[in-house]
Image (cartoon, coloured by chain):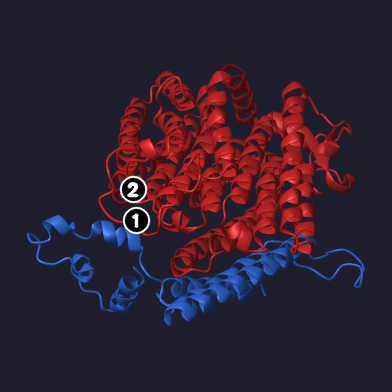
Chain colours: A red, B blue
Amino acid sequence: MSTLVPLPVIIPLMAAAISVLLGRYRYVQRAISIVSLTAVFGVSIALLVRVDDHGIIVHRAGGWPAPLGITLAVDRLAALMLVVSSFVLLAVVIYAVGQAGEERRRVGFHPLYLVLATGVSASFVTADLFNLFVAFEMMLAASYVLITLGGRADQVRSGMTYVVISLVASTLFITVLALLYASTGTINIADLAVRLQDVDPGVRSAFAIALLVVFGIKAGLFPLFFWLPDSYPTAPGPVTAIFAGLLTKVGVYAIMRTQTLMFGTPGWMGTTLLVVAVLTMVVGVLGAIAQDDMKRILAFHIISQIGYMIFGLGLFTVAGVAGAVFYIVHHIIVKTALFLVAGLVSRRAGSSRLSEVGGLVRSAPVIAVLFAVPALSLAGLPPFSGFLAKFSLVDAGIAAESWVVVAASLVVGLCTLYSMTKIWSGVFWGEADEQPAREPRTDRRWGAPVLMIIPTAALALGSIGVSVFAGPLYGVAERAAADLLDEQVYVDAVLGDDDLDEARP
Amino acid sequence: MTVLLALVTAALFGCGSWLLMQRRLSRIIVGVGLLGHGANMLLITSGRSGRAPIIDGGGDYADPLPQALALTAIVITFGVTAFLLALGFRSWQLTRDDRVEDDVEDRIIARPRPEHADETVTDDPEDTFGPDDEDDDANAATEATT
């Protein structure tokens, strides 16, 4: 069974190599991307089912025992993230095929996209901090090229900010790795969890803060988010969607993994995270209210939603972390769907600026429905997935008696609803006040090519699916949270010297 | 030796951080390079120092793991720096200027609305952001692109 573990990393990487070689044949490249990502989706589901029944699966590359060799480990959280991310990656690549954009003009799109998928999968399955760094770099290197793929002036301008900020974060990551290795002599996460207990508490706190900053830059935490709303919206539509949906959440995943497993969750860390969470939520949503462009409103909402996830984590209770895990699952799907709809609007109406678009509810009703479902979900209205995700977080917050954070999250929820209605009334109702930048394209019956509609609809249905199957999903999230908060489970599974695949249930 | 390495690391980090604060992209790229070297240097010093293994024989080897890690990190830094240089060149091709510009959208939002333009003195973005001589050329470039 442990042979399944490296597959989500190996399949897209091999596919990327083949895709480069067959760069001349666009249809072959498309087939490779879709087939390989479907395979990753299948493997991820198999891993999730297996892990949920039998506990953590560990793969030791080359058979070297844990602290020495390269170790890959899949626990419930990693498996859940793999399933959601591969689903989203698959949907977005189909959307990119349907859109007459960069995918058709550039040979590099498919290989880069697959390398991005490799990096995302690798950061979920690695049990080693240095491999986490390598996985991040794979993901980021691909994202640097994807974000500037068109080579337009605005893309280069915002791409520069993105690349420089990410590079600074990576440098900081190497620095922290060097210091961690100097003080403990290991970079295996499970081994670190054991050895950090002997390190002076002050030094340990410094490591915890440094890693929070490193991953906070990637996740877009307050006050490290400033690069995000500037750089994301200028990229090609499908690329923005996948960045918005996945990349920041990989940062959140890394924060969850390191803060829970390695540092034994001290009380002050919880308070710090809760303060950061409130500020991230409030600043993000206020930024969104000020904007006039659909994509930029949505980009600011990424930041405010990251605050919710950190809120759940900062409670450091099983209910809180479970809420955060559930929130990530809901958010990845909904956010990607919204950005795909923004791409549809921009194609149909010639602009995504609220003042230049209007009346789409009559001229393109399909797009309006596809926007309404994830938008209401994001705002947290019942019966959509956002309501359940927010409810579980607020419930956990009340149980932990964190009144300020609960109140802030409810107010931010209202502001989210306000900016979603702002998009609705600006884009779908009323008339356009100004002439759009490009010519509207009214050639299609559904408002867009069918290959763009289908993946967007699949994601909207996926978000409804999250609320329909909320019970079992929350169960998995709860068990994942229990595993995270009891670091002994992970340590035993990774460091255990038994030759069995599954260390313990 | 360790003190020397520590001093070199500190110098690299210091120069790198200073260059990173500049507005010219060429300086930022050099700064990122220096920071990367500093981090890699730190990575090498994090292991135990000693003799070369196998060739010298005997005990007291240098710790090989940080060197392997540093090697990986150097390759990554190299690749990304090359990309950053290409990006800087592209930016120079497009604008004939390698300054990092401000966010265009933020300026549009911060500018007074046209319908209230008669109440406010001007909607020239340089006034809303205050005088900043370093910024003037960047503003002109921003205006040109919008």
In the displayed structure, A477 sits above or below A27; it is above
Which residue occupies the extreme bottom position in the image? B96
Instruction: Name the residue: 60% across, 48% down.
Output: A98
In the displayed structure, A222 sits above or below A439; it is above
- Judged left or right of residue A62, residue A75 is left
Marks 2 and 1, how far apart at CA: 7 Å
Instruction: Bin the neighbour count of mark 1 within 10 Å (Cα to Cα): few under 14, some 14-19, many 20 and up.
Output: some
Quadrant of the drawing holding the N terminus of chain B:
bottom right
- Displayed quadrant of residue A47: top right
Q: Amino acid at mark 1?
A: Pro
Which residue occupies the extreme left position in the image? B119
Picture coordinates of residue B99 (x, y %)? Answer: 41, 76
Q: Nearer the viewer, residue A6 or A96?
A: A96
Quadrant of the drawing holding the C terminus of chain B:
bottom left
- Displayed quadrant of residue A81: top right
Instruction: Bin the neighbour count of mark 2 within 10 Å (Cα to Cα): few under 14, some 14-19, many 20 and up.
Output: many
Picture coordinates of residue A457 (x, y %)? Answer: 55, 34
Label 1 marks which chain's residue? Answer: A
Of the numbered discs 2 and 1, the one sitting upstream in the chain is 2
- Judged left or right of residue A459, residue A402 is left
Q: Are marks 2 and 1 in contact (CB under 8 Å)?
A: yes
Picture coordinates of residue A458 (x, y %)? Answer: 58, 33
Q: Amino acid at mark 2?
A: Val
Picture coordinates of residue A247 (x, y %)? Answer: 56, 48
Q: Which residue is tagged 1? A: A436
Q: Which residue is tagged 2? A: A357
- Displayed quadrant of residue A391: top left
For mark 2, give the secondary structure. loop
In the displayed structure, A291 sits above or below A169; it is above
Q: Quick check: can you spot residue A181?
A: no
Label 2 marks which chain's residue? Answer: A
- Judged left or right of residue A398, residue A340 is right
